[in-house]
Image (cartoon, rainbow, N blue to C red):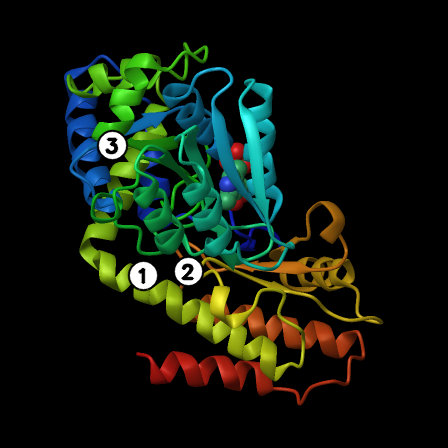
Amino acid sequence: MDDKLMLMIPGPTPVPEQVLLAMAKHPIGHRSGDFSKVMAEVTENLKWLHQTTGDVMMLTVSGTGAVEAAIVNVLSPGDRVLVGANGKFGERWAEVSQAYGLAVETITAAWGQPLDPEQFRATLEADTEKTIKAVIITHSETSTGVLNDLETINRHVKAHGEALIIVDAVTSLGAINLPIDQWGLDVVASGSQKGYMIPPGLGFVSVSARAWDAYKTAKLPRFYLDLGKYRKDAAKNTTPFTPPVNLIVGLQVALRMMQAEGLESIFARHQRMMQATRSAIKALNLPLFAPDVAASPAITSVAPLAPLDSEQIRSLLRKRFDIAMAGGQDHLKGKIFRIGHLGFVCDRDILAAIAALEATLLELEYGGFIPGSGVAAAAKVLTQSR
Ligand SMILES: Cc1ncc(COP(=O)(O)O)c(C=O)c1O
């Protein structure tokens, strides 16, 4: 059946109908009074979502553009940066930093394992000359489904006293508690196609007072990504360049929906989705790629063993049920598949996805589970945590 695609990938994520309808109108002029009103509301509500009284800027970029904006606005050529790399995205921030001529040091962990905060503590403590200017951490590492212990790493950064912390919150913002002001996170970047429940096209960057101080002396080249321009214009409820007005109108509706649900409930819902999914995968006797202690509430990675083939599972899920799950990236291609449960996702989606996965496994003649056990395990978690 056509036109019944169910997205269970970690972005783009499903978009609520009321958001789609809001976006389906003619674009309004971005210098109009009507658009200024939308901007005023959205800017305020973004602060609520980001748990900050500081600035949250909207840029017409994807998540990568938002992180690049974070880097170029607070650093200068040759600055020493410490980058946490335990997956594709952490590695990308090391590459971006190198491209801009920063002195990059990585702290790594195997893909599928969390970063070790102790390694950050040791390196930061050893830096008595205070040469480390920034620490860049991917909170939810989407390529593996690992949630890094940002809170502890950030505590070590704060103890250092000089370094800023830059956070890739692309698959954590709006899904996982990230109290920007309370933790004192300096620059936090995210993207619209994830927890925000709208399509791709907008990047968000929050900036602390300390980071604005660094901005004043930062010398990396910037023009389109110059956050100062966005800050100045946001104060007048406008944007420096033509924004994707329809996306922002959609965001206005999505943020109202999030406010109605409440932050605590949103985070609890993502926890439940994760627990139900992981419980089902365990019941199906399929190996989980990320350990329980470092599992991302946004995404669950599964590493089926031979003769099962994750690409075959994904392609059958798509063919028979029109359910899209994500594959592995880079060296994990063909080795894992990833179930996104991020944004506009509810109990029904998890139950449907697990039931379809079971049917797929049966078609592939995988005899390692009792039919119905995955659905039963997910249903149990969902019922008990209601
Ligand atoms: C954690 C993380 N960081 C960065 C990105 C890059 O975002 P984009 O593809 O929107 O540039 C993604 C995309 O999935 C992501 O999950």
Q: Sequence order check: which comes first, mark 3 or mark 1?
A: 3
How far across and down, in percent of the image, does residue 196 sit? 36, 45
- Is 372 rendered above or below residue 129? below
Mark 2 belongs to which amino acid?
A: Val
What residue does disc 2 label?
345
- Is 252 rendered above or below residue 339? above
Element on which disc 3 rests: loop
- Which numbered mark, 2 or 1, is in the foreground of this view? 1
Element on which disc 1 rests: helix
Name the disc covering residue 208, or none. 3
Mark 1 belongs to which amino acid?
A: Phe
Give how far apart the Cα atoms at labels 3 and 1 are.
23 Å
Q: Quadrant of the N terminus?
A: bottom right
* 227 relative position to 320: left or right: left
Which of 367/151 is in front? 151
Q: Quadrant of the C terminus?
A: bottom left
* 287 relative position to 81: left or right: right
**Residue at the (29%, 60%) spot, across then down:** 266
What residue does disc 1 label?
267
Which of 351/208 is in front? 208
Element on which disc 2 rests: loop
- Quadrant of residue 222 within the rendered picture: top left
The verdict on label 1 being within 8 Å of ligand 1 is no
**Residue at the (44%, 16%) spot, across then down:** 76
Dot 3: within a 10 Å radius of its alpha carbon, few (fewer than 14), some, or many (20 or more) residues?
A: many
